[in-house]
Image: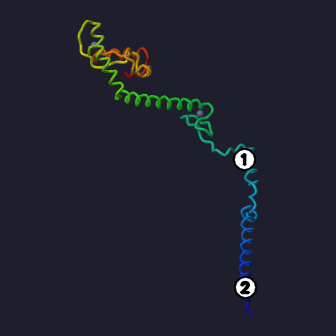
């Protein structure tokens, strides 16, 4: 016997299906069909505690990085030589700062602002070495020098009163003086 579906019955079966389907979907979205969350790994936790009790830290112990030191450590150096790591960190910082300053200085000497104030200094000094003038000699200037060195007095880099026109010979003398006075290298 075949079932003769009337159009009304088809609609009602269809709507039943959709009702069931939407029920199923909302149940799934609320996590009813999801597997329960996994139990915490108790075996792992216990073994970590056991390891700690036995003094076996998770980091392997290696010989200290200081040549000739036989102490074992989980860090780069043993406690006795930990100051070396700090020293190296400071040295890296110092090198970085120096490179940064060198780059900054190189960029400064190429800048339009420097070229402008340098010309002003040369005009003011009549293009003559100011130290040669003090020795009562007339010598064309080769460079414009920062009286207070650029490296240490960066804020005075464009201050006209901090600039002096010098010949190469006097600039070399001034550079040596700066080294004695301020130490390290001199950048103008
Ligand atoms: Zn050591
Ligand atoms: Zn001179």
Q: Nearer the viewer, residue 12 or 178?
A: 12
Q: Is residue 83 left or right of residue 103?
A: right
SS at badge 1: helix
Pinpoint residue 59: horizontal percent, then vertical percent: 64, 44
Q: Quadrant of residue 161?
A: top left
Residue 2 - label: none
Q: Nearer the viewer, residue 75 or 176?
A: 176
Pinpoint residue 28: horizontal percent, then vertical percent: 73, 65
What is the quadrant of the C terminus in the image? Answer: top left
Q: Quadrant of residue 75?
A: top right
Q: Quadrant of residue 71?
A: top right
Rendered position, 166 above or below 27 = above
Query: Does the residue tagged 2 have its C-beta within 8 Å of any atom of ligand 1?
Result: no
Mark 2 crowdedness (10 Å alpha carbons): few <14, some 14-19, many ≥20: few
Q: Earlier in the sequence, mark 1 or mark 2?
A: 2
Separation of disc 1 and disc 2 at Cα?
74 Å
What is the quadrant of the N terminus in the image? Answer: bottom right
Pinpoint residue 157: horizontal percent, then vertical percent: 40, 21
Rendered position, 28 above or below 59 = below
The residue at 76%/53% (across/down) is 42
Residue 6 - label: 2
Pinpoint residue 65: horizontal percent, then vertical percent: 56, 37
Q: Is residue 103 left or right of residue 168?
A: right
| Residue picked out by circle 1 | 51
Mark 1 crowdedness (10 Å alpha carbons): few <14, some 14-19, many ≥20: few
SS at badge 2: loop
Q: Is residue 50 left or right of residue 68?
A: right
Residue furthest to the bottom: 1
The residue at 41%/15% (across/down) is 180
Mark whose residue sits in front, 1 or 2? 2
């Amino acid at each position: 016997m075949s079932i003769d579906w009337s159009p009304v019955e088809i609609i009602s079966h269809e709507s039943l299906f959709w009702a069931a389907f939407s029920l199923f979907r909302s149940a799934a979205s609320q996590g009813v069909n999801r597997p329960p969350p996994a139990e915490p790994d108790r075996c792992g936790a216990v073994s970590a505690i056991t390891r700690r009790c036995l003094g076996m830290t998770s980091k392997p112990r290696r010989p200290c990085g200081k040549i000739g030191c036989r102490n074992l450590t989980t860090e780069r150096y043993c406690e006795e030589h930990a100051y070396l790591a700090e020293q190296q960190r400071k040295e890296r910082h110092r090198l970085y700062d120096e490179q940064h300053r060198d780059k900054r200085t190189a960029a400064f000497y190429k800048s339009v602002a420097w070229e402008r104030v340098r010309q002003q200094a040369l005009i003011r000094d009549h293009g003559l070495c100011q130290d040669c003038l003090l020795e009562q000699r007339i010598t064309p200037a080769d460079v414009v020098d920062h009286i207070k060195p650029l490296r240490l007095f960066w804020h005075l880099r464009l201050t006209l009163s901090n600039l002096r026109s010098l010949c190469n010979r006097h600039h070399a003398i001034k550079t040596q003086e700066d080294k004695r006075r301020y130490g390290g290298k001199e950048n103008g």
